[in-house]
Image (tube, grey):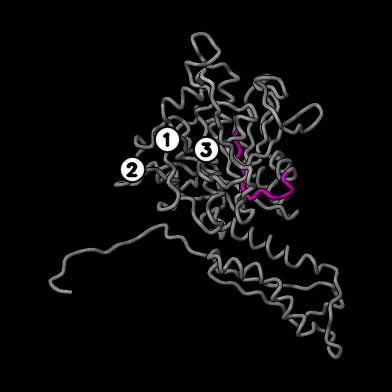
């Protein structure tokens, strides 16, 4: 800044309290593996500030971010290699760790300026555990719809799914994408190993990143992780029925698309990309004739034949469940009128409950998130005996045009 007398302005963001129209963009990121005593929390200069402490002694720190300018307020700053505090301007371990935090959080907001992000940083060298997603979701009062995990090692998909199933049973469903340090993961391992199995629908594994050399020098040991901030940002920006691989809408803009083991995607054969896709990994790819880059698909770790094989299927059904529950909840334990002659459900009551259950689905259909729906209640139910009303809901999802087959040729006439 110059030394001349002047009045200067620094624009801030987020003061108007603008929020997205729903909680669909509310997201989380869990960071771990930075090493003991690398990051320090507190009010002193150079520390990370404004985080709530979890546990005593601390096991993690959590802060809610609603705009990218909060990074500086939180003490999360970017330092270029060459301008660091180490010998000859080298980056210290703390500066590299802050760069990793800055990069992934800012990438989230680059992809979705209207997102809300709950960030958890594990204390010291504490590794990320499956239960951390529950701690963060409960901190967010169940508002998160998707969460990314940045972990030194892969957390078992089955272990994560067990945690997420428990959250769903407690009416706090969400999708999780995890990435980990892939520096020692070989192409043979990736192409020969699928982490998918039946029922693992709330977990996805990201192995794609930006392999730009300058970025890698600034991230140091954290360069070989997937682009988790950008991935969660895209998911949060997408309407629940939209695939994150949609070319028209979700350009990633990475400088050098790569796999997290350092292999630039331009050097990965199409055959190997097909194997990675078949193994249900999420990575970054390019399309011939297009200068940008995109996610290959929106795979979950469920089997390909499952109704919940893709993130958009899971997000859509989760939103439907949340909406139906919110509309029916006020009537839980309420009086229930029955037909005096049959003891079965009263016809007007059936119509009222069907309409109430279907209201959220009607809104989703109007928003283009469902192709159609139907809520049905059998009036012959003996509710006096069971005190239970069975509601059957059928949703017709939106499709995704994953492949286009074009027949083209010459003809002597049309």
Residue occupying the point 54% across, 11% down: 86
Q: Is residue 22 above or below residue 112?
A: below
The answer to whether mark 3 and mark 1 are in CB contact below 8 A is no
Residue occupying the point 42% across, 40% down: 253
Q: Is residue 39 above or below residue 327?
A: above
> x, y percentage for residue 413?
14, 74
Residue 77: quarter of image = top right
State the residue lying farthest toward the front: 5
* Visible residue check, residue 41: yes
> x, y percentage for residue 49?
69, 28
Magenta span contains residue 265:
no
Dot 1 lies on which element? strand
Read off the residue under disc 2: 291
Label at residue 258: 1
- As measured in the structure, the alpha-carbon distance from the residue carrying label 2 to the one carrying label 1 is 15 Å
The answer to whether mark 2 and mark 1 are in CB contact below 8 A is no
- Compare marks 2 and 1 and give the one earlier in the sequence: 1
State the residue lying farthest toward the top: 87
> x, y percentage for residue 339?
83, 87
- As measured in the structure, the alpha-carbon distance from the residue carrying label 2 to the one carrying label 3 is 20 Å
Q: Give the range drawn in magenta.
A: 140-150
- Compare marks 3 and 1 and give the one earlier in the sequence: 3
Residue 232: quarter of image = top right
Residue 370: quarter of image = bottom right
Identify the image quadrant of the C terminus.
bottom left
Residue occupying the point 62% across, 37% down: 155
> x, y percentage for residue 26?
63, 48
Dot 3 lies on which element? helix
Magenta span contains residue 143:
yes
Does residue 400 appear left or right of residue 303 in this picture? left
Read off the residue under disc 3: 107
């Amino acid at each position: 800044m110059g030394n001349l007398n002047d009045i200067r302005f620094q624009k801030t963001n987020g003061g108007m309290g603008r929020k997205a129209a729903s909680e669909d963009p509310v997201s989380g990121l869990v960071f771990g593996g930075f090493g003991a005593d690398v990051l320090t929390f507190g009010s002193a200069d150079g520390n990370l500030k404004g985080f709530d402490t979890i546990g005593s002694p601390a096991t993690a720190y959590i802060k809610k971010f609603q705009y990218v300018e909060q990074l500086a307020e939180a003490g999360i700053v970017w330092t270029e290699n060459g301008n660091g505090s180490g010998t000859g301007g080298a980056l210290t371990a703390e500066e590299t760790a802050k760069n990793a935090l800055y990069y992934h959080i800012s990438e989230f907001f680059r992809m979705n300026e209207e997102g809300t992000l709950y960030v958890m940083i594990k204390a010291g060298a504490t590794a990320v555990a499956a239960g951390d997603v529950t701690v963060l979701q409960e901190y967010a009062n169940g508002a998160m719809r998707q969460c990314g995990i940045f972990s030194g090692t892969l957390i078992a998909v089955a272990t994560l799914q067990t945690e997420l199933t428990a959250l769903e049973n407690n009416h706090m469903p969400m999708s999780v994408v995890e990435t980990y340090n892939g520096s020692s993961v070989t192409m043979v391992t990736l192409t020969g190993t699928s982490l998918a199995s039946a029922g693992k629908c709330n977990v996805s594994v990201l192995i794609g990143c930006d392999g730009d050399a300058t970025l890698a020098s600034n991230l140091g040991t954290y360069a070989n992780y997937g682009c988790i901030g950008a991935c969660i940002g895209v998911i949060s920006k997408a309407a629940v029925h939209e695939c994150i691989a949609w070319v028209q809408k979700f350009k990633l803009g990475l400088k050098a698309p790569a796999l997290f083991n350092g292999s630039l995607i331009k050097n990965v054969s199409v055959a190997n990309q097909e194997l990675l896709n078949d193994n249900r990994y999420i990575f970054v790819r390019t399309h011939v004739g297009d200068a940008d880059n995109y996610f290959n698909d929106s795979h979950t770790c469920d089997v390909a034949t499952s109704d919940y094989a893709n993130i958009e299927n899971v997000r859509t059904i989760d939103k439907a469940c949340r909406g139906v529950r919110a509309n029916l909840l006020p009537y839980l334990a309420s009086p229930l009128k029955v037909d005096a002659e049959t003891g079965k459900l009263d016809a007007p009551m059936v119509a009222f409950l069907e309409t109430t259950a279907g209201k959220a689905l009607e809104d989703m259909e109007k928003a283009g998130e469902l192709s159609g729906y139907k809520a049905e209640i059998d009036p012959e139910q003996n509710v006096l005996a069971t005190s239970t009303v069975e509601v059957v809901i059928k949703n017709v999802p939106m499709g995704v045009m994953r492949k286009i087959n074009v027949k083209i040729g010459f003809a002597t006439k049309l």
